[in-house]
Image: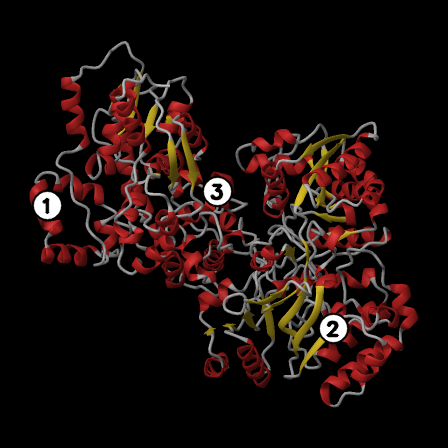
Amino acid sequence: MASDLARALAAAVRGEVRFDPAERAVYGQDASNYRQVPRGVVKPADADDVRAAVAVCREYGAPVVARGSGTSIGGQAIGPGAVVLDFRRHFGKVSAVDPQTRTARVEPGTVLDELQRAARPFGLRFGPDPSTHSRCTIGGMIGNDACGSHSLAWGRTSDNLHSLDLLLADGTELTVTGPLPPAERAALAAAPGRPGVLHRELQALAADNLALLRRAVPVLPRRGSGYPLDALLPERGYDLVRAVTGTEGTCALLLGATVRLVPEPPHRALVVAGYPDETAAADAVPGLLPLGPLTCEGMAADLIAALLAAGPRPSVLDRLPDGACWLFLETGGATAAEATDRARQLADAVRRERTATAALVTDPAEQRALWSIREAGAGIVTRLPPAPDGTPGGAAWPGWEDSAVPVEQLGSYLRELRSLLRRHGLRGVPYGHFGEGCVHLRLDFPVRERPQAMREFLVEAADLVVAHGGSLSGEHGDGQARAELLPRMYPPQVIDLFARFKRIWDPDNLLNPGLLVDPRPLDADLRFPGRELPLTLAYPQDSGSLLNAVHRCVGVGKCVDTTSGVMCPSYMVTEEERHSTRGRARLLGEMLRGELVTDGWRSPEVREALDLCLGCKGCASDCPVQVDMATYRSEFLYHHYRFRPRPAAHYSLGLLPLWLRLAHLAPRAANAALRGRLSGALLKRLGGIDPRRALPALPPRRFTSWFRSHRAAHPADLGAPAVLLWPDSMSELLDPAPAIAAVQVLERLGFRVQLPTGPVCCGLTLIAGGQLGLARRVIARSRRHLPPDLPVIGLEPSCTATLRGDWPKLLDGPLELPARVRTLAEFLDEREVVLPQLTGPAMTQVHCHQHAVLGTAADQRIAARLGLTNRQLDAGCCGLAGAFGFERGHYEVSVAIAERALLPAVRAADPDTLLLADGLSCRTQLTQLEPSARPLHLAQALLRAFEQSEQGGRPPG
């Protein structure tokens, strides 16, 4: 019984044991096409917990699946009815770095970037660098023998390991090392007990099949399919580290590892070589490798098209030379001159090919920007751009994403692969590690309508890669996606040896069963089935389907990077998978499937996971496939509470503009009630507001009242160009200072400011809480008060983003308003206006909605025109997020988000640093949690610049 197993595990381990439906749902998928619902999840605190958990699972006959960050593309991090061990949650420290021996001791859940940060002070690094380096774990990298872009220089994970501490399913522990001399191999085989038996059987497996292993196992740098049995050969020194690396968690569990480190080149240069097509680039690779580049990465024009389809055009694309396929050739050196000289040699070699072009990039920032395009490939290519004939793009799925051939065969393989794709009517975007013959490729398989088509293609593709002397997988491993195809790559005798190898390590088949040996069918257990439910919001990019929308999430896991960016604020502090964008998408998918999460829109599991979603919209921009969890959250809350009582905060904060307008009928009395010790506490309690939050005071007068007085005293110049200022509810009713400043700035610059003809509201507070019917009515009323044609300036980023992004989702028919909406910075940036100088240091806390929907390029240019030395904080969300930080039950998470990066940066700044924060939420969080902070809206900073210029008698500019 699962309940008995759960109780036994809870009694045995100090870490977390979760067997609830929500946890099983979010751990039932990885980055593959598959869904395997586990029996439960254990998050071990240390090695003792792993030992205890395995002992309990062995007693109950429960399979065990080891999991790092869940980014496995073949289905290796999931297992039906298994107990998933989440190593990343608590078991991921770098224990030590030894610069003398150039080694480090790590736990299996150590994130690669954490290891790199620990090694960097010594001028060292771990060589392999997959594109998921910000979240992938060392244990996961060992499980599939990960490589990355620099394997040309530093090899695969297996080339960079000194020793592995292993735990077998029967409780046996042993440490394995690399190649050994004959005497040491004999000593291991003579050891008593289970370790000796294991060594004898492994050595016998090799000794009995020397000719077969030498003949039937292809030798190529990117062979990631099958067990690496050739590592057991005498000439390989019985290399058990290599033999167990890449076994996908099917043989042993990792308790710790000693990894080798390599010197980090102090300086790098990048050659971008352009070719007329991908086969021309591939054919050129063998001639470039003797020059020793650190990388030789290939990406074709379709990757750029996919990038442009996903968002605005990055300016760094201008650095690409002419061509339709590009090779990224990196060099390193002890000095910048040395790295550049090596790069020039490569560039000269490229240009000797008549049809090739080359660009030399030495600026580190430009290099990083170019590499970010290549690293984003894993996410970008999951959504195909429109075809040249105008056919809309669609979703692309893994299954054949990292085949590999000898590099001399790469051009021929790519030509025939393209032909095979045409015959099957499939599209994809090839790119990858051309220097080692490895090609990444996701394809638009009709996985929901006709999954058989995936099988038909994969069988032929397997035969094609084998005909070129290649491997089904070059670095991601086989998993369920390709293990069934291994007999097309290896003869039956080798397949039998794989089964023998697995039995030697795991005779009871408890570790990740169904992979590599006796594999599950490649087209079984697909994650895509689900039901369509009636929706309220529009999903034009997903054919009006929430099912399509949540399946945008392919599990690449950028949302579980806790080091930078906006996405996902609550996960960054809780590190609970269900609080990541990926985890929430999984739960919504299970809700639509209706098997594990059975209550549909009434699901308490989905509600709990979405309760800590701040609605920051960071995922809409930071997620490579634009999963928009804020929109899905609004949709869910609308249906969840439809015809039912809502939480108190939905009435107090969701209807905040209404209550503020009523309060302004008697502002002094309202302030007395808000500030009173007993009355304030009562209002917070009735409104579902955390008692530790200070309620904001009402200003003496509303912004529109000030504007009428101002206009009476300063009549408008009717000949000046008119602009409509959007008086959002916060500027109108809570903090009018930015709006007042904006009017004064715009008039100084020669514009005639107008306001809507009546009260307006963007509906954000209603949309955020899922009160979508009322939001529609509010928006419809507001639209009637907007004169046509005028440019509209929004001051509050969340409201401005709502006008641009959310109104089209709520209202039927085309809308012309979003195209007219600008932030103040965008409006001024688009016009040739002369600005005064403010000068000095500044730091900007960017509102999440501005980051996600509006962008900040114009703000950076305006700050530069003011003469400010501005630094945009990489602090992510402030943690208040409108109503979120005020709601009861959210205070600790809200403060923890702010303390993660924002507040430390503000406290560390020089006292004379100008702090810019356009969002009222950001300013409120800062002033409530750090009383010394004095954040200003950009409009207030501009007004200060004008006033200083006027007082000093200096003309603007």
What mark, if any, has residue 177 been given in the picture? 2
Mark 3–mark 1 Cα distance, whole angstroms, equals 39 Å
Tell me if 311 is positioned left or right of 177 in this view.
Answer: left
Query: What residue is pinned by disc 1?
Result: 670
Mark 2 or 1: in front is 2
Q: Amino acid at mark 1?
A: Ala
Residue located at (70% from left, 61% from top): 157
Tell me where residue 78 appears, x and y as whole percent. Answer: 59, 66
Q: Quick one: label 2 or label 3, which is nearer the N terminus?
A: 2
Q: Quick one: label 2 or label 1, which is nearer the N terminus?
A: 2
Residue located at (49% from left, 59% from top): 593
Residue located at (58% from left, 83% from top): 55
Placement of 433 over or under 55, stated as above or below: above
Within-10-Å neighbours for mark 2: few <14, some 14–19, many 20+: some
Placement of 84 over or under 868, stated as above or below: below
Query: What residue is pinned by disc 3?
Result: 621
Tell me where residue 857 appears, x and y as whole percent. Answer: 46, 32
Q: Amino acid at mark 2?
A: Thr
